[in-house]
Image (cartoon, grey):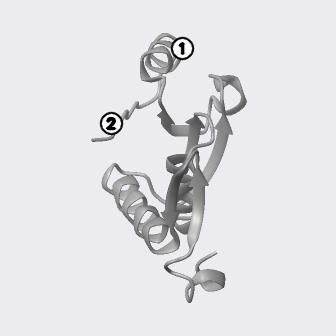
Amino acid sequence: MYSNNKDNQDDIAINYFGNKIKYKDLFKKIDDTAKALQANGVKKGDYVTICSIKTPEVICLLYALIILYIISIVTDKVVMSISMNKTFFIVTSEIDSVKEYILNNWKERIVAPTAK
């Protein structure tokens, strides 16, 4: 995406319900997201489950995961059985229901970073 649009920095990359994001802003958000993931311990080879609807933030997250060579699983429901043994990081807007499920069903290390 970057190589195809590096000369189109001021063009609109995403128009989400009237929220227009330019490529230069999208690239910065992707880089910032990648840095935040690394700061929270996410590293190459990790698995990340994303429980969310498709939003610009999720698009940034997906591209950040690609940049960092991290495997992602996207779902709009808490379907943890598909990755019960591999997911170490979960990104969701439904933190309470996901946290409750994980605390009741997982025995692994749990990291739940929150967005500011």
Within 10 Å of the Cα at label 1, are there few (<14), some (14-19), or many (20+) other Cα atoms?
few
**Mark identifier at residue 114:** 2
N-terminal of the pair, mark 1 or mark 2, is 1
Picture coordinates of residue 19, whole percent (x, y):
50, 51
* Left or right: residue 113 compared with residue 90: left
Mark 1 vs mark 2, foreground winner is 2
Q: CA distance from mark 1 to mark 2?
A: 21 Å
Quadrant including the N terminus: bottom right
Q: Amino acid at mark 1?
A: Asn
Q: Nearer the viewer, residue 97 or 6?
A: 6
Residue plotted at (69% across, 24% down) = 81
63 in relation to 58, above or below: below
| Lateral position of residue 23 relative to residue 29, left or right | right
Q: Secondary structure at mark 1?
A: helix
Element type at marker 2?
loop
Question: Mark 2: which amino acid?
Answer: Thr
